[in-house]
Image (cartoon, helix red, strand yellow):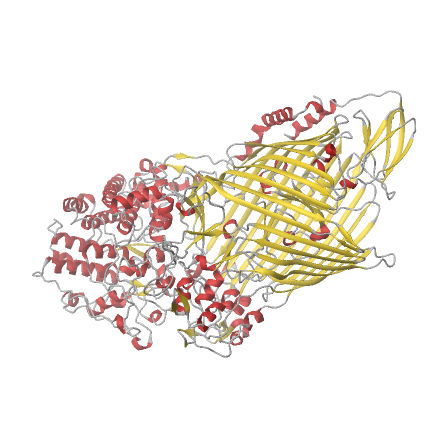
Amino acid sequence: MKMKYINKNNFKLLCLGLLTLAAPACTDDFEGLNVDKGRISDADLAKDGAEAAFLLPIMMNNIVVTGTGVQTQQNLQAESYAGYLEAPTAFIGNVNTMTYSTKGIWAGSYDASTNNVMNNWLTMQKKGYDVKYPDLYAIGLILKGMAGQRLTDTFGPYPYSKFGNTAEPKFDSPAEVYAGIFADLEKAVAALLAAEKADPAADTKRFAKWDRSTFKGDYLKWVKLANTIRLRMAMRISVVDPAKGKAEADKALLPANGGVMDLSTGSFQVAASATAVNPYFTMTNAWSDTRMSAAIITYLDGFKDSRLAVYANPATHAPIAGTFRGIRPGIEKPADKKPYINYSTFKVAEFAPVKIVDGAESYFLKAEGALRGWNVGGTAQSLYEEGIRASFTLNGAGGVDAYLNSTSTQAAYVDPANASLNSEPLTSNTVKWDEAGSFDNKLEKIITQKWIALFPEGTEAWSEFRRTGYPAQYAIAFPTNPRLPKGTFIKRLTYPNLVASSSKAAYDAAVTAYLQGKDEPDIKFYWMK
Amino acid sequence: MTKKIYKLVVLLLLCQTYVFAQNISVTGKVTDSDNLPLPAVSVKVSGTTQGTSTDIEGNFTISVPSTATLVFTYIGYTSQSVPVQGRTTLNIRLAEDATALGEVVVTALGIERSAKSLSYSTTNVSAEELNKVTGANVLNSLAGKAAGVFVTQGSGGPGSSPRIVLRGNKSIAGSNSPLYVVDGVPIGGFSDYNPEDIESLQILQGASAAALYGAQAANGVILITTKKGKLGTTSVNVASTATFDSPFVLPELQTTYGQGSNGIASTTGNQSWGPKISNGSDAHIRDFFRTGENYVNSVSLASGNETQRIYISYANTTAKAMVPGYGYGRNNITVRGSSKAFNNKLTVDGGINYINRHTKNQNFSGWYNSPMFGLYLFPMGDDMNKYKANGGGKWDASRGFYVQNWPYIVNEHSSNQNPYWITNKITRDNLNQRTNLTGSAKYDLTNWLNVAGRTTYNNYGSDEEQRFGATSDPTSVGANGAFNKRVNRGSELYTDVLLNANKALSSNLTLIANAGFSNTITKFDEIFNGNDGAGNTLFYADYFALQGLTGNFISTSEKTKRIDRAVFGTAAFGFKETFFLDVTARNEWSSTVNDPFFYPSAGLAYVLTNTIGTNNFLSYAKLRAGYAEVGNSLSFGQAATNSNYQVNTSESVVGRPTLPFFSGTDTISLKPERSKSIEFGADLRFLKDKLNLSVTYYNALTEDQVFTIAAPTGSGATSFYINGGTIRNKGIEASLSYDTKFGAVRWTPSLNFTRNTNRIEELSSLLTTDRFVLNSGNRLTNLFLLRPGSSLLQGRKYGSYHDLFGKTYQYDANGKQLFDPVTGLPVLSATDDQFIGNANPDFLLNMNNNFQYKNFNLSFLVDGRFGGLVSSSTEQWLDFKGLSKRSGEARDAGGVMLNGRLVDAQTYFGHISSKADYGAAGLEYTYSSTNIRLRELALGYTLPKFGNTFKNVNLSLVGRNVLFFYKKAPFDPELASGTGNGAQGFESFQIPSATSIGLTLRAGF
């Protein structure tokens, strides 16, 4: 081979020849290199059975986000709309979710659960854990159902049933999402009961280490959680689809299915870890970004409810120092937050877990069930009063007997900073049950007391307000969205821009089919009044 | 693998056996016109392939038939053919080739080739030109020195590197940085090198070196040749530069209206919408800065004899930034040596390059913890002197230390803090060390074939500590302060083995060829421990140590390794010194890519004047054309479908947020990006080489761009890595230089022109969306990639990389601007996705002038950047706070006249700035980047020779960023908030760029 005969083609041949000789040796040591060894591998996770459950902690920490991500997930949205907590901060010049401008900001309401619950559930499913670890997969399904319920209640259509089937799945209608969740919860309850039956210690052996909730890995408590969610959803559709609602409620309450949460289970609360700071503590103190809302204060104050001092601290603003005072929702806040920064704060402990489902909720759901003639094992009054007692117990509050006979009403609202925000009581509703009252009076009592018990979990409270209109809420004073003028209430959140742009075809189809063609916050769907 | 190459070498050796009879031995010496010996001159027997070359003293010995003719060739000199005619001694003097003067080009592998044989565009920047105005970072000096080079200043301050892009941005998610090759070996970065070690710097704007160095060379290559020992002499060179910095541009503020709101004075907030005041001043801004000082001192020694050469240098850079407390120090030590053995057949070269950099108290820039934020937004009329003392603190008896003294700490979309507190109590120190060991050996198998092996081991580590004193910004720092510590180390081990041939195949045909193999192992390790925002603080106030971290603090580690291997070959054929053909090929295996990949290139050069001859007008003409394909291996981890999981502060495993694209159970195998480029060019010289013109047109298509996109909802991932698009860059580079004399004054001006246009030709059809969101969240503008046909293109056929989108004003069908009938305010678009413009400049034009008069030298560089946009968060905030000059002028006028209606100024500026949050009129805060500046100025004087000790002494007065001839933006538009791909076209409370004036002294002994 003389050099002068090496023309371009020969040269290529030479190279290719070298390639063939070198190729196998060239890549032998590439195996397993393309991953960061500082992170944990599937192989490491196979040890001690971790692989079955390792995704569950992050999932349970993203139903209500247990980190400061909760601020843009629901603190600035549902918790404001529920009249629980209100930011003293003029985010985006007050043109934000609290004043009903929802577009293009704060995707957390959608993303937190979608990315951290739904995506991780899909990983579990793709790994075949539904067959391999049906009990732990069932926990994943419950978390998926809880996430899905909150997502569809907040936005409407959601790609629940086809999630992960393709890169661009279609959105389900809210009714389809509900049907999918009912099925998932049923499957989860059956799997957990079967596992418990096979080995009553299965949960402590396999799950306790991974359970970041107050249920500490107890499968039977998780069964009750699933049934409570099922009952909650059954009630949500009790008007729009009464037959389905009743049937689902029956299954949720069937003793053989494990029952619902009660005083014995307590509330379902989750923390990132024992030493993690509660995000509301950070938002209240370090950030000064959240304060008590007007409604929760005026109701509790008016009812002389001893839970007020459990939920809130008195204001420090000089004219009202020592009294409890909330901020009216959706007002125009000054850039320096004053004086609202010195209104009542949320009394939250630094290391408290975050409440996802309140232990008293099921009593109120059953009370409403009784009101609707469902077979719930009690009268509306007894269940209503049991619910209030449960909530007082869970909050360590006293004086419940007198409270149950209280006939005082919501207090008037006075804003020392702006008299135009003052308001007379919105309702004459009282605590004391009135068996002679109308259906609506009774429903108002049940929902109002449930609302007090659920504090501060705003997403469920806002959904129930949208379903029932109770308890009466202050209209926002500074609406910035012309579709929702003064006196109206927001019905849903709009999808994040990224959802609309990254899933355009599916998004357009869902908006057309299920939202009257408008991805707007005034559009009602499915179970909404 | 290497063994196989050696086998090949042996094989090739066997091809080379010639026998001659009846020869005589001819010896002689080859010298240049100054009678200095010329080493390495090719001495060939005409009509054969036999030959030798001269040694270091210019001597040669060759055994030839007595009737032979010897041809002496040397790059840059006119060849001579000399018949032997029986003589045994031949002393030859070669004349410099006027047409090739200074035209020796060091190509990628360190091979010197004549410029005329190159089929691609290249620009040489001499060390002298590069180091005319020395700064802390050598790369800043590249601005305006060559066509095709885009320089964006870093986030400010010594120690920050600029963004260098050649021929436009080709990759969306990957690197657009050129490859730096020092003495033939690729290195990670060059910004911290000792500029005095540079002998010359060669810019290859195109992808021509990619076959040799792989994908990063697709972004162009900057080849640095460093100084080596000099033959026969020992020289010592000293260079010393002192420059002094002052802010180049500071924001323009109104000083008429004081603190308050709605015209009413108030000291509670930091707004300046109060009543007219008489004590308004913006002096606190200028007063905050100190005179920056930069001292660069270096000394080098070079020595050598026939077989050994050595070069040793030391450089120290010490800088005090304009921001108080911020200091920078760097030590560079270089030792290089080379030696020849075995009859000069073996050349061994070795070097050590040690760099240590220490950055002290480097401030943050941008919104959070940036001193600029509190400084620029200080309310008008308040007295900054109240807050300066005790490092911006006031005594707190209950806590027992100085707490931050600042009434304007408020969480309003960012944190406003006392700038003096930040410079004293929020500190960021970084120690960075780098050692580069290089070694190479070359063995001449014959006079036309050698085998060479090179290796370089670049080992680096950095240690960074960030300390946030107790009572710093409460939104991000807990009550007892915060501490972050990041320690990392990394290494790159590059090895190659090459077989190089340089041979005249016949009297008309020459070949330079090489084949080689390279292996690169890259490792990186990092640990980080630190507080997790405001929810987590130190156990003891201001105890900045790992033991002081408590609760759920962040603790992460990273450990990565990649291997890249390649075989490659290149061949350059020359025919009659007129036609030149380059071909290259490369095949790569990378641990980041699933399959190996191959790419070729070819180029052709034609010296037209060899055919048509020269005349008084045209003295030289060359035409060239080239085509190159380059594959770009994937970034670490992108192709991994089973990537490892992150564990968060609560020991919870976080799912895999970003994965290679999948649809249901189908996962794509990510392909390497592939760039295909063509270039055409001409190098022309006129008027007896006085006027030189070089023009290049290029057109590069980069396919299968890999980037991260937001995954469609319900797909199961947060983001996808995807081969998502195709980008085309095309443009023109031209440079024109002239050399003339007016009496005793020699004037050598040069002009560089650079134009690049970019368009997105295609987005992946795996998805239906009309846009990929690259960057959003700076509150003014977003970066989208638009699919051709998207409605957001607003009539344009294609979108471009770095198109800016935001809120714009609305117009009715007749083009009349819309105003809110109630408030009178301009109506903004509903969403922030309206096209505003592109961040990249339309073209660059710069002119370098050099005047030489006797011992005086005056040079100045006028640099113009035309077109391109940059949005400014600083201006948005200044409007919101009532501090901008125009907000004062609006108040002077009683408000803002809009559509015949006078609107209150505070209302108007609050509206368009969206009170500094999302939703602002992005258009309003997006400025043209067009500017023309006097970038460099140097006036030098070379002392007449005196004594025997000094060989030369030169003293220069130097200046950088001396003045703007023209500028539209109220800040330096070349400052970007960062050098990353997504940070372009956005400015946010950057440290101002500096005007530097100083003195440089160079002396040789």
Observer-nearest of B327 and B927: B927
| Residue B821, image x, y percentages | 32, 63
Task: State the image quarter where residue A414 is shown.
Answer: bottom left
When the figure is inspected, residue A250 is found, relative to residue B919, above or below; the finding is: above
Which residue is painted at 92% across and 26% down in the image? Answer: B86
| Residue A402, image x, y percentages | 15, 68
Observer-nearest of B439 and A106: A106
- In this rendering, would B659 be left or right of B163? left
Residue B176 visible? The answer is no
Observer-nearest of B460 and B68: B68
- In this rendering, would A129 be left or right of A470? right
Q: Which quarter of the rendering shows the N terminus of chain A?
A: top right
Residue located farthest toward the left when viewing the structure as drawn: A436
Which residue is painted at 46% across and 75% down in the image? Answer: B258
Which residue is painted at 27% across and 71% down in the image? Answer: A324
When the figure is inspected, residue A188 is found, relative to residue B477, above or below; the finding is: above
Residue located farthest toward the bottom when viewing the structure as drawn: B278
